[in-house]
Amino acid sequence: MYGDRSRLIVLTDIGGDPDDEQSLVRRLTYANEFDIEGLAASASGTPDELGCAVTRPDLIREIVAACGEVHASLRAHDPAYPSPDALAVPRDASGTEIHAILEVAAGDDPPLTSCRRAVIRVE
């Protein structure tokens, strides 16, 4: 817990299916209940399914921008809603690797991506 709210880093494989976008919208609806430390896009799909990494941080940015359009209304209900600037996704904050957990499990050392660096910076 960080203060009275749990700290959270949202890692999503957004872009593969519409449900990922819907889930992020739902998560941001409750952004006042958590201390969201970061939003990051990871590769969607399975390694054999796509053939290449599909990483869509632009979809996260679009959803955060849409939240910005209703931010004043959200703050009227609870001043704990973070501003769109607080949720901003840096231009390079995405993981381009496909399923790094599989790489680690296989004993490989996956590259240190901008997404991983952002997670490491959160203390």
Image: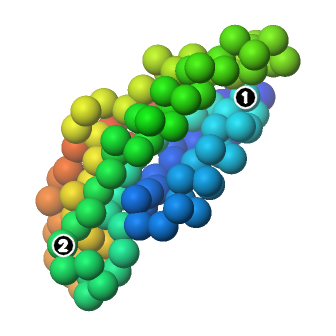
Residue sticking out furthest to the right: 77
What's the residue type where badge 2 is placed?
Cys
Q: Name the residue: 18% across, 53% down.
A: 112
63 or 120: nearer the viewer: 63
Work out whether residue 105 can be spotted: no
The first of marks 1 and 2 along the sequence is: 1
**Does 36 sit above or below residue 74?**
below
Residue 59 place in picture, x, y as percent: 41, 45
- Front of the two marks 1 and 2: 2
Q: Please, what is the three-letter code of the amino acid marked with disc 1?
A: Asn
Picture quadrant of residue 3 = top right
**Quadrant location of the N terminus?**
top right
Residue 110 placement, left or right of 87 = left
Q: Is residue 51 visible?
A: yes
Residue under numbered circle 2: 52
Determine the residue positioned at 22% across, 38% down.
Answer: 92
- Please say if 47 is above or below 88: below
Question: Which of the 4 image quadrants contains residue 70?
Answer: top right
